[in-house]
Image: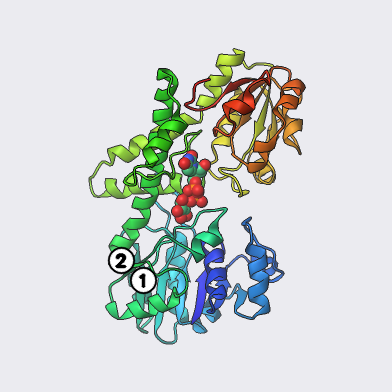
Amino acid sequence: MKLTVIGTGYVGLVSGVCFALSGHHVICVDKDEEKIKKLKQMESPIYEPGIEELIELNLREERLSFSADLQDSVRHSDIIILAVGTPSLPNGEADLTYIEGAAAEIAKAMEGHKIIMTKSTVPVGTNEKISKILAKFTHHSFDIVSAPEFLREGSAIRDTLHPDRIVIGLDNPELEPTMRELHKGFTENVFVTDIRSAEMIKYASNAFLATKISFINEIANICEKVGADVTEVAQGMGMDQRIGSSFLQAGIGYGGSCFPKDTNALIQIAGNVDYEFKLLKSVVEVNKGQRFMIISKLHESLGSLRGSTIGIWGLAFKPNTDDVREAPAREIVEALVAEGATVKLYDPIAATNFRQQYDHPQLRWCNLPEEAAEGSDAVCLLTDWSLLKDIDLHQLAKSMRNGVLIDGRNVYSKEQIEGTGLVYHSVGRPQ
Ligand code: UGA
């Protein structure tokens, strides 16, 4: 099939590359000409393990191309996939400017029937709006499909090629075979439903996963007070198949470009129909507070932080990405600066992005985790990068001024800490 994917962010680029890999002819379009130029030279605008190799393979086999010309690409395709951003407006609602702009441009380029498939996360009713915009600017026929995306940054290619399920929302049943054909080889688990339900499935899924995280973080906070171990509790809970073991890892809370944005958007979607989503509001509140547990634990060990030196390990919102959007690290570092600490920062790949968004004379940028720890009063682990698991903790304790280690992701075991002399705090586990 001939496809155009509009938007070369995480969702657009990864989908484009994976559809090309499964044999379709794909044009990835972006209005940012600089991005397109780099992509043609096989340079990815996003950090995602394996993506550049797949871009190269697809370009070599001539199934993938890149273009800044949306209208020309649309003319040469049967299916147009919308994968542009839907960032948050100040009130939490999703900003649909890019979606609406792209829909109008698609319509103006149409010279025959097209299928328009939305992969961007959009509030319930948006595909109907897209339909109206298309009808306003073209007299050609079209079909609308909602196909929400469930990939995670850092494992985006695997998630796309081997998803748990594919959700397809449509109102014309005749489209179902085409949609199944398009996704052939990914999974047999294709769930076909109506458009509004498909739009809702995406928000409900992200909101539910965020709820699991805030839930286990509150359990962790209680565990600390009653002397239980949250990792044991999560394991024991997860063995019940009705609960499941994933997304029960306690820590400093969720970040990224999806959970914070989508939970707030769903609260707004509910609010717009006079429904107060009380549970989800609490999930968001709990998440906002959880990151400051790092600061409380520092106070517990060091008292005032004025004049102290604090090392930070990890700035990305999670490992295997350079993405720092809504990363808990930002507010933690800002709080440390406000309290008068010197902060030594290390992240294997996200430091440049972090520094572009926030820099301060009290910050020191480090190339190695050991460098961030040297001479520090405390080190706080904020992102569970796997390389941090192998740090020599005995050496670490010796190199620090005060050997306080705050493990915000429960990376180290009791056995690893024993005998090191470190003052160790983790989340929801006996100290
Ligand atoms: C999330 C969803 O997992 C994807 O299914 C969805 O497609 C995507 O949002 C999206 O809407 O585009 P992502 O934001 O890439 O994916 O990252 P996750 O792996 O879900 O992690 C999100 C945050 O939750 C991270 O900060 C992570 O550290 C935190 N987390 C995750 C926990 O604190 N505990 C856990 O047990 C799991």
Characterize the local packing of mark 1: few (<14), some (14-19) or many (20 or more) Cα atoms within 10 angstroms. Answer: many
Determine whether, in the image, residue 163 is placed left or right of residue 56.
left
Q: Which residue is drawn at 73% across and 26% down?
A: 396
Dot 1 corresponds to which residue? 145
Q: Which residue is drawn at 22% across and 45% down?
A: 274
Q: Can residue 92 be seen in this view?
A: no
Characterize the local packing of mark 2: few (<14), some (14-19) or many (20 or more) Cα atoms within 10 angstroms. Answer: many
Secondary structure type for disc 2: helix
Determine whether, in the image, residue 407 is placed left or right of residue 360.
left
Determine whether, in the image, residue 240 is placed left or right of residue 17.
left
Residue lying at the far left in this picture: please name it. Answer: 274
Say if 326 sits above or below 298 in the image: below
Say if 68 sits above or below 382 in the image: below
Amino acid under disc 2: Ile
Q: Residue at x 44, y 76 (%)?
A: 182
Q: Which colour scheme is used?
A: rainbow
Contact check, label 2 and label 1, Cβ < 8 Å: yes
Q: Residue 242 carries which label?
A: none
Q: At which x and y percent is residue 285?
A: 39, 33
Mark 2 sits near ligand 1, with its Cβ under 8 Å away: no
Dot 2 corresponds to which residue? 195
Give the camera-side residue of 35 and 232: 232
Amino acid under disc 1: Val
Q: At which x and y percent is residue 221?
A: 43, 25
Give the camera-side residue of 9 and 408: 408
Q: At which x and y percent is residue 420?
A: 68, 21
Q: Can residue 427 be seen in this view?
A: yes
Secondary structure type for disc 1: strand
